[in-house]
Image: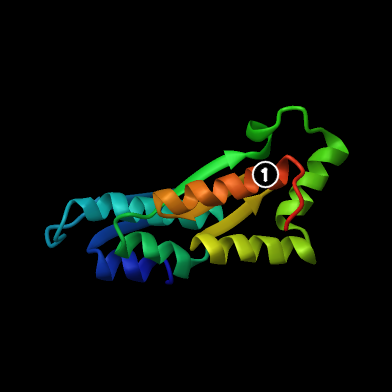
């Protein structure tokens, strides 16, 4: 219902979920106020599927300048293997200092960051996601969190 309500009632877009086929279908209605709502709803559902909270993803429906940027840790440094890859992931999303580092980056850049295995997803405005990506790349390359 958290996904259905903003899409159907606020944006006036029909939504159909097919769990067997693992697909979500979106369709405009006769009372849809703006055709761009269809793209906004698609971005909202995509952000939710990437792992963002519903509350964070709803910001995509309300604000035009937000988008999601995704990249892999191996895009930054190809030679990371085994322990080094685990260390890089730990610096980004590990317990203890890693969580503080991630929250500090999110608060400083006004973005939301989700790490899923070796993929990193950043939700925010263009300039803010660029700054957050630069911070994360420095962490992956081994710079200290400070």
Indicate whether 114 appears above or below 117. Answer: below
Asked if one can make out residue 22 in the rendered structure from this viewpoint, the answer is: no
> What residue occupies the far right of the structure in this picture?
83
| Left or right of 73 on screen, residue 11 | left
Q: Would you identify the image quadrant in which residue 101 lies?
A: bottom right
Q: How many marks?
A: 1
> What percent of the width, then of the height, locates residue 134?
58, 45
Indicate whether 13 appears above or below 39. Answer: below
Q: Which residue shows up at 27% across the image and 58% down it?
A: 14
Q: Would you identify the image quadrant in which residue 64 lies?
A: bottom left
Q: Which residue shows up at 33% across the image and 58% down it?
A: 15
> What residue occupies the far top of the structure in this picture?
79
Colour scheme shown: rainbow
> What percent of the width, then of the height, locates residue 107?
55, 67
| Left or right of 69 on screen, residue 28 | left
Asked if one can make out residue 24 in the rendered structure from this viewpoint, the answer is: yes
> What percent of the width, then of the height, locates residue 42?
35, 51
Residue hosting label 1: 138
Indicate whether 102 appears above or below 72. Answer: below
Near mark 1 (Cα within 10 A), the count class, few <14, some 14-19 or many ≥20, is few
Indicate whether 64 appears above or below 77. Answer: below
| Left or right of 61 on screen, residue 73 | right
Q: Give the quarter of the figure containing the N terminus.
A: bottom left
Callout 1: SS: helix
Instruction: Pick the residue in front: 16 or 98.
Output: 98
Instruction: Pick the residue in front: 106 or 37.
Output: 106
Q: Which residue shows up at 65% across the image and 60% down it?
A: 102
Q: Give the quarter of the figure containing the C terminus.
A: bottom right
């Amino acid at each position: 219902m958290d996904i259905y309500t903003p899409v159907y009632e606020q944006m006036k877009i029909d939504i159909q979920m097919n769990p067997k086929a693992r697909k979500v279908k979106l369709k405009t209605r006769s009372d849809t106020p703006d055709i761009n709502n269809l793209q906004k709803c698609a971005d909202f559902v995509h952000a939710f599927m990437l792992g963002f909270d519903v509350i964070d993803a709803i910001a995509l429906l309300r604000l035009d300048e937000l988008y999601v940027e995704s990249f892999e840790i191996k895009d930054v440094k190809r030679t990371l293997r085994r322990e080094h890859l685990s260390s890089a992931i730990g610096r980004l999303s590990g317990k203890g200092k890693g969580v503080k580092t991630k929250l500090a980056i999110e608060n400083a850049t006004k973005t939301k960051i989700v790490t899923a295995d070796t993929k990193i997803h950043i939700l925010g405005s263009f300039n803010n996601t660029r700054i957050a990506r630069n911070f994360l790349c420095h962490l992956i390359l081994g710079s200290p969190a400070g």
